[in-house]
Amino acid sequence: MFQKHVLIDNPMLEIKSPRIDEVRSSILDERAITLKVLRLDEIHPLVTGSKWFKLKLNISYVQEKGITSILSFGGAYSNHILALAVIGKMLGIETIGIIRGELVEPLNPVLKFAREQGMILRGMDRSSYRQKHKAWLIKKLRLRFGDFYLLPEGGSNELAVKGCETLAQFIPKVITQRGLCVALPCGTGATMAGLIRGLACCQRVTVLGFSVLKAEGYLATEVAKWTRATACTELPAWQVIDDYHCGGYAKSNAELSAFMECWKTDSNIPLEPVYTGKMFYGLFKLIEAGYYREGTEILAIHTGGFLKTHQQHT
């Protein structure tokens, strides 16, 4: 029985328990591999995927302290920025999004939707953006926007990681007991770290993260930092795969585009090219290369994405 999840006792932000779908494919049959998908993209009509879990404890803290404004950072296609804007509108909290690079009009679908939710958007040159954690820059932002709760890029902090620990409850114990590979896309590593911590003592589980960044080794370092922050020493094995970013964050290539066209023909599970498309592309490349032994059971976590939200609300 799954715990009921409501954000700040607000019924508009209640989520439903995600279902698990199975992917059918000839290559999966040939290799006797089972691939199932945890559909976090369906838990809420607007705040989909892992972003709900990353934000829930941060939003609780903001409301408990009576804070009325949140500032955060993100790329031009950030699902975090979109989710924060939606929650801010629903709860009456001012949201400010500092976007990496110049804001180009007309805005892309993600930023357009965020602005429609009332989020204040400001572009920041890439050189300054790299200094976003520095005190002098935060002070400058406070002088410009007033006082605010600072939420790191992607909403990734210890509260976010702790919120993502609860993702483990959606993975049936009967699967973890017989052995399982859990796969998910990674942009900051916080969701992956939270999941690893939530799966503590599940020694027959391996967690595999697919980096969407062109930054080899960076996410592995971040995940290691957050997993070291827990007192539990019996964590499952994990690895970050850096080989399928397809050029970097929000970048694509011909192979990824071709894969997603085939996916649309063969599956009714929607993907987007920034996160979930790269994970499934990477999974099938590993399967083709013989990375998984016969009989492996894989559970891929669909972390949501902007595409479905945009299609439903434009």
Image: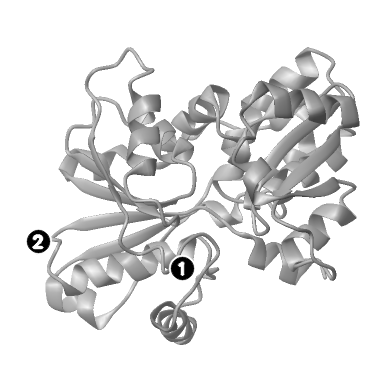
Q: What's the mark number on residue 293? A: 2
Among all residues in the image, which is located at the extreme left?
Answer: 294
* In this view, 287 is above or below 10: below
Residue 174, x across and y down, in percent: 26, 41
Would you say residue 227 is visible in this rendering?
yes
* In this view, 58 is above or below 78: above
Residue 210, x across and y down, in percent: 36, 54
Q: What's the mark number on residue 277? A: 1
Q: Nearer the viewer, mark 2 or mark 1?
A: 1
Helix, strand or loop for disc 2? loop
Would you say residue 59 is visible in this rendering?
no
Residue type of the residue flagged with mark 1: Gly
Q: Earlier in the sequence, mark 2 or mark 1?
A: 1
Question: Mark 2 touching mark 1, by CB under 8 A?
Answer: no
Residue that appears at 34% across and 35% down: 221
Helix, strand or loop for disc 1? helix
Describe residue 45's horizontal placement relative to residue 263 as left or right. Answer: right
Can you tell which quarter of the image residue 140 is in? top right
Residue 211, x across and y down, in percent: 39, 53
Residue type of the residue flagged with mark 2: Arg
Residue that appears at 29% across and 63% down: 35
* In this view, 114 is above or below 106: above
